[in-house]
Image (spheres, rainbow, N blue to C red):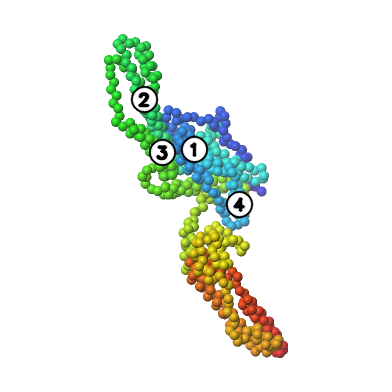
Amino acid sequence: MKRPQLLDRFGRPIQRNVLTKEVSAATIGGVRSPVSGYPADGLDPVRLASILRAADQGDPVQFLELAEIIEERDMHYLGVIGTRKRSVSQIPITVKAASDKPEDVKKAEMVQEWLERGELIEELFDILDAVGKGYSFTEILWDSSMGQWRPDKLEYRDPRWFRFNRHDFKTPMQLDDYGQEKPLDAFKFIFAQVKAKSGLPIRSGLARAATWGYLFKKYTERDWAIFTQTYGQPLRVGKWGEGASEADKNTLFDAVANIAGDCAAIIPDSMTIDFVEAKSANASSDLYLNRVEHLDQQISKAVLGQTGTTDAVVGGLGSGKEHRQVQEDIERADAGTLAAILNRDLIRPWMDLEFGPQEAYPTLVIARPEQEDLKTESEIVGNLFKIGLPLKTEQLYAKFGYEKPKATDEILGQISPNGDAPANAGDGGKQTSKIKRFLEPIKYPKPEQGTQTAQQALQASQGDFSAVDDLGVLADQLQNTARPQITAMMGQIEAMMVEANSLEEFRAMMLAGFGEIDTSGFEAMMAQALTSSFAGGHLAVEEESRDA
């Protein structure tokens, strides 16, 4: 049987012999060199603009290297971009089956089992390199050694080894061993694009905006370092007399310059220099700090959408809770984007390789479980119980995460047999006073004196069931016997519901009142019911015999 032709999302056919090989590994001295350049050295606005312009025109190498260096040299950018990536890479991943059919459920379970791999968090972190650079490439190494297809590794690949189609600058391409651009091998790569803004992939990453903040911040830090080094140092001025030679002047300058610091000068003896001192040196030093903090805050806004979780801003607008909600919004968006990428470039190809093209596929869901407000929920349950709405105890136990206690378990707050509250009761016994009167086992009323029960009527017949004229008499007598006991029980339960202020208190009353219920009355009723049934059977047989 010929296997169906599989195509990737770009309509390109797969080559099965390529899937288990590395096609974009690093090569020393080749076009995929792991050695990186350092375009940040000597960076200025003109050079930065030329680097960004070259990236827009299809040569992104220096921009990608600069983005890498910014993460290494700017601790603030490293912190916030790392926070954004780690917050998503550690979110629980679940798998939703395509349907309830057993075969679809089995596929979902297979994917879920693969997701339990310990390497997954690190692999997802690398895929999310797209948050900064705008895109990332991850090579899928497939394993078919056991006769089935399965992703073995997800290897991060340097984005410098890839390009975009010159026609649209959107379609990803890979570099072959000779540096020529060619389409991505089908089913071999996870191409992730996390957009900070709409537009071309090379211009959609956060590093694009961070480069300018990085440049201005480094200028300020350099000036701040010079100011800090020379602040408080005395100015040395050397003077030479008439007729001094160049050699004398050089000697004089070396003398004043080597005393300490850079604040040194030499002038002719006939010249004067006036030093005008700044009114507030402290204000000058604060200027550097304020500028650096301002630039850091702009980076925080760009990466996390807010500053409350990274920068302590005195008098800043908005609470920490609101700032955290903004960050959670971005987290959910990143998680949704990552899940869509994995479903498109990993899960669907996997299912196609293993089972062939499918009508529907299992779906990865990356989302944090919703946090329920159990305090509010408990108040709602209490109010519903007070108005008499019946509730399932099993559902409540599951809602609050508690296990239903067994008969042999020690119950927290349980009333002791003598009516005293236990030592662990939080109310100190105050809530048990009105429960005590329900502690005595319920005594059911006996039949009124002189009333002949059904059993007594049958005994009076001395075994001659025909002597009993009507079974309806027996039934009425049985009902009259049971009614007082049932009425007493219902009255007791209604009284408990009126007195109880909470579900827990009502439960304690029920346990107290019915924990050791006196069943002698019900036993007598059942005996009478069985006797009546026995008698009715014999009467029916005798009537049939007489009619025959």
Q: Are marks 4 and 2 in contact (CB under 8 Å)?
A: no
Is label 3 or label 2 in front?
A: 2
In the rendered structure, find residue 164 and report the number of the disc placed on it: 1
For residue 418, side relative to residue 288 (left or right): right
In the rendered structure, find residue 109 and report the number of the disc placed on it: 4
Identify the residue position indicated by label 2 in the image. 233
Q: Are marks 1 and 3 in contact (CB under 8 Å)?
A: no
For residue 300, side relative to residue 361 (left or right): left
How far separated are the C-alphas under marks 4 and 3? 45 Å
Percent from the top left, x then y, of residue 545? Answer: 72, 88
Decide which of tag 4 and tag 3 comes sooner along the chain: 4
Decide which of tag 4 and tag 1 comes sooner along the chain: 4
Identify the residue position indicated by label 3 in the image. 296
Which residue in the rendered view is the most extreme toward the top? 243
Decide which of tag 1 and tag 3 comes sooner along the chain: 1
Callout 1, which amino acid? Answer: Phe
